[in-house]
Amino acid sequence: MSEETTPPQRPSVLFVCVRNGGKSQMAAALLAARAGDAVAVHSAGTAPGSAINALSAAVVAEVGADMSGGRPTPLDPALLARADRVIVLGDEAVVDPVPGMAGTITTWRTDEPSHRGIDGIERMRLVRDDIDARVAELMEELGVDPA
């Protein structure tokens, strides 16, 4: 196969937070909705909880993304090793590189409206919008057009 006919490799992104019920699931749902099949999207938690955050799911649904079918998943070292980009959401989760890791680890210090006294659905919408803006920047970095 010539170089011109080789399809480009689909980048993979792994989003990580502690519980894998809110921010990392939101980021994954937003990227999947925006990039379609152009990116392999994964999410995981360093200490996964038992359920998806209902408010998180509601606010991503407002912008056409769906995380309702997700479930908190533990961080898999094999997935961590092969992901092109590993993005840690917030300051609580710690992800150490593994031997032979293909990609890079970046931390997104996301907006935390609760520090300003903003709670409930209003808080979650602000978190979503912050993550969504970062997802748009990530797509540009990856050279991925919106689906």
Image (spheres, helix red, strand yellow):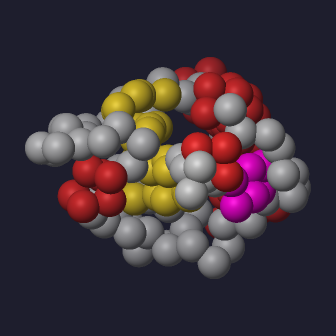
Residue 33: quarter of image: bottom right
Residue at far front of view: 2
Report the residue at 66% width, 66% height from top: 67
Q: Is residue 36 magenta?
A: yes
Magenta region: 33-39
Report the residue at 74% width, 50% height from top: 35
**SS majority, magenta:** helix
Image coordinates for residue 28, horizontal then vertical, percent: 59, 54
Drawn side of residue 69 relative to residue 91, left or right: right
Image coordinates for residue 49, horizontal then vertical, percent: 38, 67
Most foreground residue, 130 or 119: 130
Relative height, residue 97 to residue 76 (above, below): above
Is residue 39 among what the camera can see? no
Report the residue at 39% width, 49% height from top: 83
Relative height, residue 137 to residue 139 (above, below): above
Q: For the image shown, how many numbered marks are present on the structure?
A: 0
Drawn side of residue 81 relative to residue 137, left or right: left
Image coordinates for residue 123, horizontal then vertical, percent: 70, 38
Residue 104: quarter of image: top left
Report the residue at 32% width, 52% height from top: 82
Most foreground residue, 81 or 95: 81
